[in-house]
Amino acid sequence: MPELDEMWTELLREARERAANTERGDVVEYLQLREVNDAARNLGIEWLLATFLEVAAEANRRGLSLATEKAAPHSFAVGAATMQGEKIRISFGVRALTVEAGFPRTPADGFVRGGGLAAARITHFGMAKANADLLLVRANSNSKDAPVWLTVDDKNLRQQFSTAHLKNHFAVFLGQI
């Protein structure tokens, strides 16, 4: 996946240079925005997946025997859109916690609804009520701050997703809640 991301970044840079040379300011502006948004998407996805893996590693150090799997590239559907990204699966006996995170890479993939940069899904095997849909957004649209993950429920209510929420999902997965 990193090689694909590096190649994509290089292609965008070359396209931006060509647009600048032909004085296409609108295209340059779009490509700069795309580059900034892609960096924010990758940062948000990396944080989400790395934090779940970190919590799993901490549990293993305490003596649990959790198995982890990572799949990249990975695609999954969110509504009519296809997200391209990564997936991790953490197993403990028959219990499984899956985290998928990604964003549409091409116009054919669609778009993230709700003004999001990326989407994620947390799935608890056999416990559908514990599942969560996440949306990566900018905390402030005029800001260069790091994006934040929000949970989105079936009524489209949004709440900021924090490390505490992540650890709560992990506790549910382990049967501690």
Image (cartoon, rainbow, N blue to C red):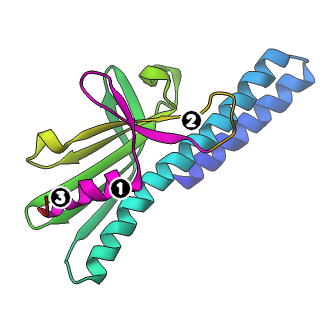
Percent of width and height locating residue 122: 28, 45
Q: Which residue is mark 2?
A: 139
Residue plotted at (31% across, 49% down): 99
Q: Which residue is mark 3?
A: 173
Q: Residues within 10 Å of mark 3 (few under 14, many from 20)?
A: many
Direction from residue 124 to residue 15 in the image, left or right: right
Q: Name above or below for residue 96 compared with residue 130.
A: below
Residue plotted at (12% across, 59% down): 95
Amino acid marked by disc 3: Phe
Res 110 visible = no
Q: Name above or below for residue 109 compared with residue 143.
A: above
Q: Which residues are magenta?
A: 146-174
Q: Earlier in the sequence, mark 3 or mark 1?
A: 1
Residue plotted at (85% across, 18% down): 25
Q: Residues within 10 Å of mark 1 (few under 14, many from 20)?
A: few
**What is the secondary structure assignment of the residue under circle 1?**
helix
